[in-house]
Amino acid sequence: MKYFTHVDSPLGTMLLVSNGSSLTGLYFVGQKYVAQPAEDWIQTEVAQPFPDVKRQLAEYFAGERRTFHLPLSFEGTPFQQRVWRAIAAIPCGETISYGALARSVGAPRSVRAAGAATGRNPISLVVPCHRVVGSDGSLTGYAGGLDRKQRLLALETSDGGSVRESRPAAELQGPLRF
């Protein structure tokens, strides 16, 4: 069974999707690859973990939260899931290149595949794919739009926009939050 609700954010309305116990989707309405509620999905405000998601999102957008602590469940290929787990390990206020991301999941020659998996990330913000940038630091590819990506990165930095490049990819393989 799938549940869904919407929440307003400073960057637009977001769609939340749950399996009743874990967050399975968090999308900006209108973004590329956004899930479309099916007829058998139930719209509700109270399915788990929606109340916690809404509270933590409000704290994040208010600048009071840098990490999320939510139960997550991914629906994707094993490779996509490896990429999403590596993305989840990128610290707030830091970025990593698509090449470094590919290396961190043991597929150094699969930069495009890592990029494609990043674009299909079903749990944006919580799994911060906006922190993945081009090899030269440029803001490239974000399913929610480059304007949102720039605003999210600015929100996460104390000086309003100067993002540090992340640690080497090998250091991203520490404990994960889900």
Image (tube, rainbow, N blue to C red):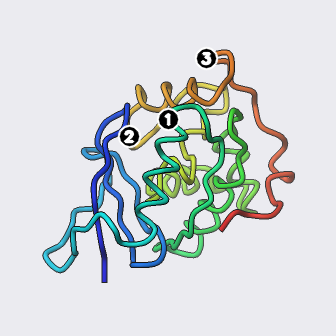
Element class at badge 2:
loop
Element class at badge 3:
loop
* Residue occupied by mark 1: 61
Residue at 75 percent of width and 27 percent of height:
164
Q: Quadrant of residue 86?
A: bottom right
Residue 160: numbered disc: 3
Residue at 44 percent of width and 68 percent of height:
24
Residue 22: numbered disc: none
In whole angstroms, how far apart are the C-alphas of marks 3 and 2?
20 Å
Q: Quadrant of residue 47?
A: bottom left
In whole angstroms, how far apart are the C-alphas of marks 1 and 3?
13 Å
* Residue occupied by mark 2: 144
Which numbered mark, 1 or 2, is in the foreground of this view? 1
Name the amino acid type tagged 1.
Phe
Residue at 42 percent of width and 60 percent of height:
51
Cβ–Cβ under 8 Å for marks 1 and 3 = no
Which x, y percent locates residue 72?
Answer: 54, 69
Q: Quadrant of the C terminus?
A: bottom right
